[in-house]
Amino acid sequence: MSKFEYLKLADTVAAEIAAGTLKPGDQLPPQRSFAYERKIAVSTASRVYTELLRRGLVVGEVGRGTFISGEARRGVAAAGEPRGARIDLEFNYPVLPDQTALIAKSLAGLEKPGALDAALRQGTSVGTPAMRDVAAAHLSQAAWSPSADQLVFTGNGRQSIAAALATVVPTGGRCGVEALTYPFIKGIAARLGISLVPLAMDEAGVRPDSIQKAHREAHLSAIYIQPVIQNPLGMTITSARRADLVRMIEKLNLPVIEDNVYGFLDNEPPLAALAPESCIVIDGLSKRIAPGLSLGFVVPPRRLRETVMASVRSGGWTASGFALAAAQRMIGDGTVAELTRQKRLDARARQKLAADRLSGFEVQSNEKCYHLWLTLPAHWRSQAFVAAAARRDIALTPSTTFAVTPGHAPNAVRLALAAPTMDQLDSGLRTLAAMLNAKEDDFASTE
């Protein structure tokens, strides 16, 4: 069989999906059975399945098998946009009932001609000295206090990630990331021509030995991790693990892109407190304030600041003058600090409700954060569970969205708790609990 025969077989399966012979949710046979049925080698069957995963035609669930996803992937799969579901447990932007009035009070006067004229001027990657001062003070946590002359600003947190990646990872380079990670980094890396390498995790976070192994197999240019309130698992890495990670990255001389976007919900400082010359800290305001008022922060070591600034300018990621002016007011007068205080309380209340409603199920979370990781009972598959929830007007995110390696997603879903009202959240969690207690086939038969 020619080396391209597996592509023809993948095309055949794709045609069967397009024709409806294979339907979304159908399970493909084990690779050995597929090889026997198609009269091919098992190694060829493996390449067929890998190609189908690459195209997004199938999804793999660890311990469950390979299932038809029903969608061809065009380019790189990325998380979508809010779909208007009645109960949105997919997108995680906390907005408190009374926060708009608080924000409006802070921004009062910005509409006056003098203030507005200044705010509407072209922003720069370094903002103004006053903005750098208030931002540096605001970002300080425990043992970490960035200097104002380290800061670089972007339009949002994703742009900050892109700028940091472009700074330390060359086109064609490799970046280590948590095996389950923030989904948007996959699209960012693909557009920059960067390969993501999954790093093994345990209950304490990324394992240092997995970084060493990945670097030994093929040089890593950097790693991207979320040490505080990791998305999607919610964990904050322990002090002992922090020390081990710092020893490893300094031994290997690896830059660390440290995503601290959920750090405002915790008091733990970034890894940069232990390794200031190795870490580029990423943060933003959309979670702290609201999705419609975004601003990204990059805090690199001083030696990398000019390169980060160049990446921001060349990428078109410079923050707007209006966002900088609004953020300066809201940080400077304590509005962001008050929103942070209220959102910490809100997150704990939502986690308590979720723990009550999902009692008895396998949940991994953190009482301080706005999301949780729900491992499904054996009689449910993650894709089928998400689809069944959608039919009840509840939006969830399947584990495959967070998996760096196709086909290596656990049988789980992430629930984002921030968006619904408390009444909606209660209703949604009760519905999900009823679904979890029912078998997939039995539940489908009631629809």
Image: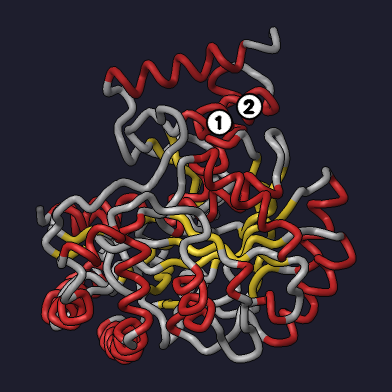
Picture quarter containing residue 272?
A: bottom right
Residue shown at 50%/64% (left/top)?
Answer: 297
x, y percent for residue 144: 64, 84
Of residue 134 and residue 435, the one placed in the foreground of this image is: 134
Left or right of 215? Residue 8 is left
Left or right of 275? Residue 42 is left
Tag 1 secondary structure? helix
Count the marks.
Answer: 2
x, y percent for residue 73: 41, 30
Q: Are marks 2 and 1 in contact (CB under 8 Å)?
A: yes
Q: Quadrant of the N terminus?
A: top right
Task: Give the labeled residue for mark 1.
Answer: 49
When the figure is inspected, residue 223 is found, relative to residue 38, above or below; the finding is: below
When the figure is inspected, residue 408 is found, relative to residue 224, above or below; the finding is: above
When the figure is inspected, residue 361 is found, relative to residue 352, above or below; the finding is: above
Tag 2 secondary structure? helix
x, y percent for residue 212: 83, 59
Of residue 205 and residue 245, the one placed in the foreground of this image is: 245
> Marks 2/1: CA distance?
5 Å
Q: Amino acid at mark 1?
A: Tyr
x, y percent for residue 271: 67, 76
Q: Residues within 10 Å of mark 2 (few under 14, many from 20)?
A: some
Of residue 120 and residue 220, the one placed in the foreground of this image is: 120
Q: Residues within 10 Å of mark 1 (few under 14, many from 20)?
A: many
Task: Give the labeled residue for mark 2.
Answer: 47
When the figure is inspected, residue 423 is found, relative to residue 440, above or below; the finding is: below
Residue shown at 64%/56% (left/top)?
Answer: 177
Residue shown at 22%/70% (left/top)?
Answer: 419
Of residue 318 and residue 377, the one placed in the foreground of this image is: 318
